[in-house]
Amino acid sequence: MFKRLAFNGWTILVMAIALVIAMPIFFVFSSIFTKSTAIWKHLAATVLQDYILNSLMLMLLVGIGVCLIGVGTAWLVTMCRFWGSRWLEWLLLLPLAAPAYLLAYDYTKMLDYFGPVQTWLRGLFGWTSFNDYWFPNIRSVWGAAVMLLLVLYPYVYLLARVAFLEQSVCTLEASRSLGCNPWRSFLTIAIPLARPSIMAGLALALMETLNDLGTVEYFGVNTFTTGIYRTWLGMGERAAAAQLAAFLMIFILVLIVFERRSRSAAQYYESSNSLRRLTPYQLNFWRGTLAGFCCLLPVIFGFIIPAIYLLHLTLKNIDSAFNDEFWSLAQHSFTLAIVTAIAAMLISLLMAYGQRLEPNWFMKTAVRIAAMGYAIPGSVIAVGVLIPVAGLDNIIDGWMRSTFNISTGLLLSGTIASLIFAYLVRFLAVAFGSVESSLNKISPSLDDASRSLGYGSTSTLWKIHTPLLSGGLLTSAMLVFVDVMKELPATLVIRPFNFDTLGIRVYQYASDERLAEAALPALAIVLVGIIPVIFLSWRITHSR
């Protein structure tokens, strides 16, 4: 077996891809064993405790919020019928198109002392100064948690809704026949059966919470991500930044292990009647109105209000908004997103097909290694990419100097190639999941028929499987495209000099309190993200 594996082209290809993709993660993890620097000791003595406590507090608040909103709304639109429930099925996904830092900038502008909300309150009640009334400070841990949960609850909503759609009709009908009302069926039957999906969505939301940079930095909340960014770019200490990144990666791995162990002893089975349509609960007018209001509330605060405010600011500055700089930023963002999406789609196709041809433990291990990146924050991946790339540049430059007396300088560090590589490490798992799911639906008999007609494995992939996988490939590319458009930490650290994107410019303008100039780039990011969200919702609705 080992000999056959050693000379199998697909196995070698997939393992090589996995090792290259996982290299930054392994490099960051290895920094744990390096000697501690004075800067690291200073960080450990001063701010490391704040990083840990603030990160834990954010995870707790966001975790509770996304579970309450995501699971509750998923059950209402899936198992209940009321006016507007069909529209809410996809409306609830819209906040997924908006990065959390855009909401942070919007709500800070709207809720500060000179913003429209406090100005209206002072005019309504006759208040003349800040001492006349109390108003909550949004720039705090709880404010950051609210911004994050408003855009991250769709992770739980999405997976919980799919789980509710796939649940056995017989189980739910049995609970009704035993006298369980909708509320009791929800608590005792639906949630336990959907627990794996809910936990998976929760884990994704918490990972994105630890990945966030724009929101927490703008609100002045010290977390691991802000610490890595400040240590790297502010202090110029790469070793200390790598050790902080390793500490955060251990944080993430503990979270993953806890999530898996929490459901390792439970097994979940569905009967063969899971795809038969279940008669939904028909809510009366008052209950339907309450359900619609509860479902619409996160959409209003997580998407509609920020989008309307951004549109208002854009129209207010329309004359200066569409300038050459905006189109240059849009071109940079679209180029990075398109190239990364195509590369991730092709690499995922090769990996998924290689696993289909050789479903051995070597291949499965390689695939799991390559898919680790999505669990790692962008700031950690940025550190893991830049340090070895810079070392490689130094080796090449030293060899060229000693051999040809020529200095090559930095060939890879701070280039578009390095940035795209970081994106692939971060988002390859997103593309692979979609491609693998679509490929598993193709019957193996097609492979046998193709071989009987004289086609090899490569010809079968391009002529038979690829046309059948068009939907899954398109979905994978769209998801990666949107993720790249929204990614901030990795872009901020790795981007080439004087090469900005829409997200970077929004971050820079908002940091300078120039939200009016940031409105159009921010609105462009939101509008681009809407298309795949609607497409994804349509596919889920028709999956049953």
Image (cartoon, rainbow, N blue to C red):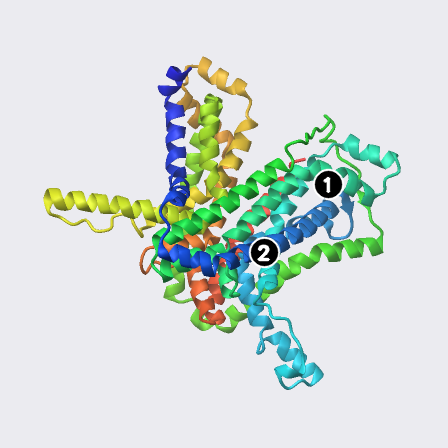
Q: Within 10 angstroms of label 2, few (less than 14), some, or many (20 or more) residues?
A: many
Question: Which circle, 1 or 2, is nearer the viewer?
Answer: 2
**Badge 1 is on which residue?**
191
**Badge 2 is on which residue?**
58
Q: Nearer the viewer, residue 84 or 121?
A: 121
Q: State left or right for residue 399 relative to residue 191.
A: left
- The amino acid type found where label 1 is placed reads Ile
Sequence-first disc among 1 and 2: 2
Q: Nearer the viewer, residue 415 or 534?
A: 415
**Which quarter of the figure is the N terminus placed in?**
top left
**C-alpha gap between disc 1 and disc 2:** 24 Å
Relative to residue 427, is residue 233 depicted above or below? below
Q: Looking at the image, which residue is at 46% across and 43% down?
A: 427
> Is residue 335 at least partly visible in the picture?
no
Q: Nearer the viewer, residue 240 or 89?
A: 240
User: Which element type, helix, strand or loop, lies under badge 2?
Assistant: helix
Q: Looking at the image, which residue is at 71% across and 54% down?
A: 295
x and y, in percent, of residue 429 in the image: 49, 39
x and y, in percent, of residue 442 in the image: 55, 25
Q: Residue 259 has which mark?
A: none
**Quadrant of residue 289 in the image?**
bottom right
Q: Within 10 angstroms of label 1, few (less than 14), some, or many (20 or more) residues?
A: some
Relative to residue 79, is residue 491 depicted above or below? below
x and y, in percent, of residue 522 in the image: 49, 62
User: Which element type, helix, strand or loop, lies under badge 1?
Assistant: helix
**Quadrant of residue 79 in the image?**
top right
- The amino acid type found where label 2 is placed reads Leu
Q: Looking at the image, which residue is at 56% across and 38% down?
A: 257
**Which quarter of the figure is the C terminus placed in?**
top right
